[in-house]
Each structure stands twice: as C-alpha cells, then as structure tokens.
Image (cartoon, grey):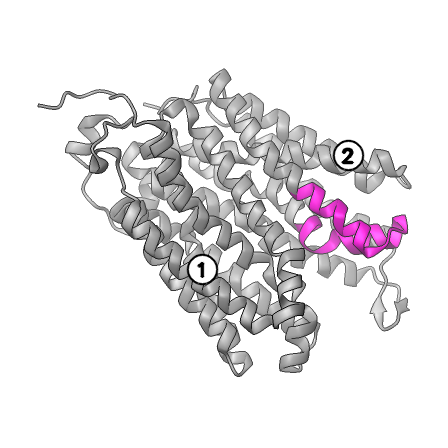
C-alpha cells in the first residue's frame, strides 16, 4: 500500500530525458515565434505585401498564443503534459505545413494563427513535467532551463534559418521544420509519461495527490478559483514588465535604435540584441537555481526587476554611452531579466497543486502580454513623435521619440517592482 507523503524522485537522467523531449517542442515554438524576421524579403516578394501586412501576419502568432494561455492551463490540469504536448506539437506541425504550402495570404495567415495557438501549450507542458518529474528544490532551475532551450530555438531561427532560406527557399525550409515537429510529436507520445510511476519509478509528488486526484473543473471555475489567491493576480501583471522590454528591444526596436543613435551597422546592432537574448536565457536558470537554493522567491525577484529597470533606464536616458559600457548594460539587463522565470515557481506554489496548470497558464499569459502590448505601443509613440525625416523611404525617428516610446517599458518595469512588494513569499513551498 502506498503511504501519503513525498516519495523519492526518479533518477535525474530519466527526468531530464522525459523533460528534454517536452522541451524540444518549446524549442520549436520559439523557432516559429521569430522565424518571419529572417524571411521578410522572401515573404514580401512572394505575396506582394508591404510592411504593415507582414507585421499583421507575424502578430497572428501572438494573438492566438496569448488567447490560448488560460485554456491551456485548464487543459493541462485535465489531460496531463503527455497528451497536451504531443497533440499540441501535431497541431503545430499542421499549421507549419499550411504555412509552407499556402498559395495565398489567407492560408498563410491561417497557418501562422494555428502555429501560435498550438505552440502555446509548450511552456506550460514543460513546467508540468518539471513539477511531476523533478524534486521541488530543482523546479525553479528547470523552469529556467526551459527558457534557455527556447532561446536556442530563437538562435536557430537566425543565421541557420537564413542560410536555409537562401539555399533552398523559404517554403522548403519551413516544410522541413514542420516534418521535424511531427517527429517531436511522435517522440513525446511514445516516450513521455505524465508521472514517474508510469515508467516504474517513484516520484516527487505526494502519493495522496496521485491516488486521489482533484475532480476536473470548468474553465471559468478554475479561473475564478485561482484568482482568489492574491499572488496569482499580481504574478499575472508583473512579468510583462520584465519580458516586454527584452522582447520589444531585441525583437523589434533595438536594432533601429542602435543604428540610428550609436551609428552601429545593422549586423553589429543585431549581435547586441542577440547578446541580450542569450544573457536573458542564461539568467533564467541561474536565478531560478538561486531562488531554489535560498528558499526565497520574492526578494530575488524584486532585486532582478530593480536591476533590469536601472539598466534599461541607463541605456535609454544616458546619451552616447561608450560601446563597452553599452554592451555591459545590455548584457546585465538580459541577465537580471532572467528573474521572470521565478514567476512560474512562485505562481505554482501560490495555489493548490491541482490548480498549478491553471496558475501557470495565467502567469504565462501575463508574460506574453508584455511584448504583445509593448511592441505596437512603442511603434505608435514613435509615429506620434516622427518629425518627417526619411532615409531611402524608411522613417527615421529621433532620440526624443525613442525615449518617449521606451518610457512605456520603464513604467511597466517600475510597476512590476512595486507590485512585487505586495506579493506573499512562499519560501519555495505551497502556501496553505
């Protein structure tokens, strides 16, 4: 007979193998997130579209991704990570194939929308595997490793994808990525299991929770229940102020800012924005591990947010920084922004275990609200402050315009620091 309590976990090699298969889907999700950035010329030429239409096409990914976060959390609690990840990867593969083979913009947009909605399950599923297969003391670090894997996917969607597009065309290259996603879906279905006991291991979950799982709840009931815990509401609002500046700067506005006001060639400016993403990816597991090791969530999160805010403020408001200082500040902004990964462990510990998927989905929705809102908002402010200067038909924005636009990042980051003060420390244990 099983006894209630925490049982020893499975071998770490087995845990990493199962989790790694799930994380491979998250790598592909990040790859698809940024892939259009290196295919802009090919897509515009193929479909005879302008920048606005291309921007809307890329944004379809984010719209469906964000919309799926709360349903994903509920589905994760009902289905478990194996079904969630394998079926999500299969749907993502279908969307990728539609995107690669589409003859017109309607089907291209449909493919992009389907990709965003289906890969939305990847991160939540990875966190569920981390929760089920790893001891609680490693949860924050493993969540940070997911971010690292995701950024590796983004790097693969940079120069390697561009080389593939140049050599074989964008359709063939994206088609290969769709076939790879099918293989990932099959591997997850065959080799991944929701709990260690399904592979003959004991696990870190309380056996009482496994033997007597909570009854399924409706989506609205799950949301209402989770939002009764104040930490969940705060952790929905906070991470967007950390992630939003990183992805708004690295994903859209950093290169024109650096080329215009520091005179950097676009290639070198792109290297700096890539360095920001790499530093962010490294900061995630490091700060997650520190949080696990110290048994603290709140104070480390506050420190990371405050450091990121200070770095961004210096980058934006101190004119003409020397290049070495600028590089250091960008790297420090990325490293300190890795503190956002603490959100997921923090949120998981702030609700009953059977609602952890719902809490994670709500938190991840808050994460993605950052770039979803800040990227177009900064663009709107830039246009409002545009003085009419053009360079080969491209609008050139002044330093005052960028400062006004980037001020939105500072406001949200400052709000995140303030809201963190009101969170309740969990000490890396579920709250009562």
Q: Quadrant for residue 232, please give it.
A: top left
Q: How far apart are the two marked residues, 1 and 2, measured between alpha carbons?
A: 37 Å
- Outermost residue, left direction? 1
Tell me the tag on residue 199: none
Q: Viewed as shown, does residue 392 lie left or right of 43? A: right
Q: Nearer the viewer, mark 1 or mark 2?
A: 1
Report the residue marked by disc 2. Answer: 329
| Residue at the extreme top | 294
Report the residue at 18% width, 27% height from top.
208
Q: Decide: is 292 above or below 42.
A: above
Tell me where residue 346 appears, x and y as whole percent.
45, 30
Horizontal relation, residue 223 to residue 214: left or right: right
Q: Please tell me which residue is depicted at 89% across the width and 38% down the height of the picture.
A: 321
Tell me the element at label 2: helix
Q: How many marks?
A: 2
Q: Which residues are magenta?
A: 248-277
Q: Residue at x 54, y 31 (%)?
A: 285
Quarter of the picture holding the C terminus:
top left
At 90% from the left and 51% from the top, the residue drawn is 263
Per the picture, the main secondary structure of the magenta-coloured stretch is: helix
Lower sequence index among marks 1 and 2: 1
Residues marked 1 and 2 touching at CB (< 8 Å):
no
Q: Please say if 177 is above or below 76.
A: below
Note whether residue 351 is visible: no
**Which residue has dot 1 on it?**
180
Q: Quadrant of residue 148?
A: top right
Q: Nearer the viewer, residue 388 or 72?
A: 72
Give residue 363's position: percent from left, percent from top: 46, 42
Q: Is residue 144 visible?
A: yes
- Front residue of 397 and 278: 278
Asked which secondary structure carries label 1, the reply is helix
């Amino acid at each position: 007979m099983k006894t209630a309590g925490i049982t020893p976990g499975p071998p770490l090699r087995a845990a990493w193998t199962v989790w790694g298969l799930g994380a491979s889907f998250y790598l592909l999700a990040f790859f698809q997130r940024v892939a259009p950035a290196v295919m802009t010329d090919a897509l515009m030429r193929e479909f005879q579209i302008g920048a606005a239409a291309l921007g809307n096409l890329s944004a379809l990914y984010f719209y469906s991704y964000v919309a799926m976060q709360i349903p994903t959390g509920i589905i994760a609690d009902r289905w478990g990570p194996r079904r969630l990840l394998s079926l999500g990867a299969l749907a993502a593969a279908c969307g990728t194939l539609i995107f690669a083979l589409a003859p017109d913009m309607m089907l291209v947009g449909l493919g992009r929308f389907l990709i965003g909605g289906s890969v939305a399950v990847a991160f939540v599923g990875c966190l569920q595997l981390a929760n089920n297969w790893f001891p609680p003391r490693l949860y924050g670090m493993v969540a940070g490793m997911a971010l690292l894997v995701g950024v590796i996917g983004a790097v693969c969607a940079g120069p390697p994808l561009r080389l593939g597009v140049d050599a074989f065309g964008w359709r063939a290259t994206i088609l290969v990525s769709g076939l790879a996603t099918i293989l990932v879906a099959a591997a997850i279905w065959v080799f991944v299991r929701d709990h260690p006991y399904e592979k003959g291991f004991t696990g870190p979950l309380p056996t009482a929770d496994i033997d007597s799982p909570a009854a399924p709840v409706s989506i609205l009931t799950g949301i209402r229940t989770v939002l009764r815990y104040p930490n969940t509401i705060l952790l929905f609002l906070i991470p967007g102020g950390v992630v939003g500046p990183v992805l708004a700067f690295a994903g859209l506005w950093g290169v024109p800012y650096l080329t215009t006001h520091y005179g950097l060639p676009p290639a070198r400016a792109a290297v700096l924005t890539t360095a920001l993403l790499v530093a962010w990816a490294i900061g995630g597991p490091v700060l997650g591990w520190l949080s696990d090791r110290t048994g603290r969530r709140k104070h480390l999160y506050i420190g990371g947010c405050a450091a990121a805010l200070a770095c961004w403020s210096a980058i934006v408001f101190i004119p003409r920084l020397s290049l070495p200082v600028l590089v250091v500040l960008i790297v420090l902004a990325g490293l300190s922004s890795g503190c956002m990964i603490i959100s997921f462990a923090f949120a998981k510990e702030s609700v009953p275990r059977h609602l952890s998927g719902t809490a994670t989905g709500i938190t991840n929705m808050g994460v993605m609200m950052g770039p979803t809102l800040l990227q177009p908002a900064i663009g709107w402010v830039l246009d409002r402050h545009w003085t009419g200067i053009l360079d080969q038909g491209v609008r050139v924005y002044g330093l005052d315009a960028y400062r006004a636009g980037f001020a939105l990042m500072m406001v949200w980051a400052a709000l995140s620091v303030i809201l963190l003060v009101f969170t309740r420390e969990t000490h890396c244990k579920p709250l009562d």
